[in-house]
Image (spheres, rainbow, N blue to C red):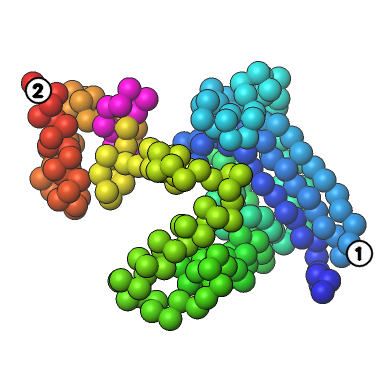
């Protein structure tokens, strides 16, 4: 089935220094405009973010500080980017949750307003998830060839989950290893937060930091030194889970030993 377009559809994607809107910066913009007659026009530019690109971001998109050293700033290319998107509806993969709000905020930061409220947006990721459900029942049907008749019964769910994992190992013998350390690493278990709620995180030295608020990325120790009143408010007045507060208390106690 062909797309029926009243106006061009602009697919776009951003590569960035990170995923924090308002703090991180764009390092590359790619746009493909699909016209009503089916032809395509492409645009791509590197962008100098004006800040170092973290190694973990480079590991994802392969763009380093050297690559963007001579690239234009976002302010320098903002007008031509907006011209490329002008008169188009929008599309992308996870574009509603990430690319549109990120680009909107960054354009605003450099003095350009981009109002997308009147545009139609086609998020390919959301269509993918609607058409190919990613719940346990879908996994059991895909890997084990049977319906999940006991869905949302706790024991039936864990039986199905165990069967899916064993079927995954059989299906991908050249990719997966039946080793818990390998499977845990693949699952991202080493990227977990110190607390279950994800209000805290580790820095590169293993110190516990906040992951939210005005001191996001600051260690508890540094917050205590710079703004002890804020730390006291967090511990007594903020609506934080008890388990998170327990981790914070233990970390602060260790600092004083």
Q: Residue at x 51, y 36 (%)?
A: 18
> What is the magenta range?
203-213
Q: Choose the circle earlier in sequence order: 2 or 1.
A: 1
Query: From where the camera sits, is residue 33 visible?
Result: yes
Instruction: State the SS at label 2.
Output: loop
Residue nearer the viewer, 183 or 41:
183
Disc 1: which residue: 37
Query: Which label belongs to residue 256?
Result: 2
Mark 2 neighbour density, 10 Å: few (under 14) some (14–19) many (20 or more): few
Q: Is residue 223 left or right of residue 178?
A: left
Instruction: Tell which residue pokes out farthest to the bottom in this image.
Output: 149
Marks 2 and 1 sit apart, C-alpha to C-alpha, by 69 Å
Q: Residue at x 43, y 81 (%)?
A: 149
Query: From where the camera sits, is residue 213 visible?
Result: no
Q: Where residue 123 appears, x then y in whole percent?
A: 63, 61
| Location of residue 223 by image quarter | top left
Q: Where residue 200 appears, x then y in whole percent?
A: 28, 40
Residue nearer the viewer, 98 or 76:
98
| Location of residue 190 by image quarter | top left
């Amino acid at each position: 089935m062909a797309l029926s377009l009243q106006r061009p559809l602009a697919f776009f994607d951003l590569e960035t220094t990170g995923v924090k809107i308002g703090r991180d910066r764009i390092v590359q913009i790619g746009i493909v405009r699909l016209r009503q007659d089916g032809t395509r026009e492409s645009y791509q530019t590197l962008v100098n973010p004006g800040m170092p690109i973290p190694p973990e971001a480079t590991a994802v998109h392969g763009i380093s500080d050297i690559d963007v050293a001579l690239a234009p700033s976002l302010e320098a290319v903002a007008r031509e980017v907006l011209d490329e998107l002008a008169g188009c509806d929008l599309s992308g993969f996870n574009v509603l949750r990430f690319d549109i709000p990120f680009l909107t905020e960054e354009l605003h930061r450099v003095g350009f307003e981009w109002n997308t409220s009147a545009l139609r947006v086609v998020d390919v990721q959301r269509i993918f998830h609607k058409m190919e459900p990613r719940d346990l029942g879908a996994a059991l049907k895909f890997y084990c060839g049977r319906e999940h008749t006991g869905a949302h019964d706790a024991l039936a769910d864990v039986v199905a989950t165990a069967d899916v994992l064993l079927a995954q190992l059989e299906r991908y013998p050249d990719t997966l290893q039946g080793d818990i350390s390998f499977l845990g690493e693949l699952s991202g278990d080493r990227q977990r937060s110190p607390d279950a709620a994800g209000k805290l995180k580790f820095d590169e030295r293993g110190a516990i930091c906040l992951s939210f608020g005005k001191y996001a990325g600051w260690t508890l120790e540094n917050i205590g030194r710079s703004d002890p009143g804020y730390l006291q408010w967090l511990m007594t007045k903020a609506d934080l889970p008890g388990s998170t507060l327990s981790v914070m208390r233990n970390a602060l106690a260790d600092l004083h030993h």
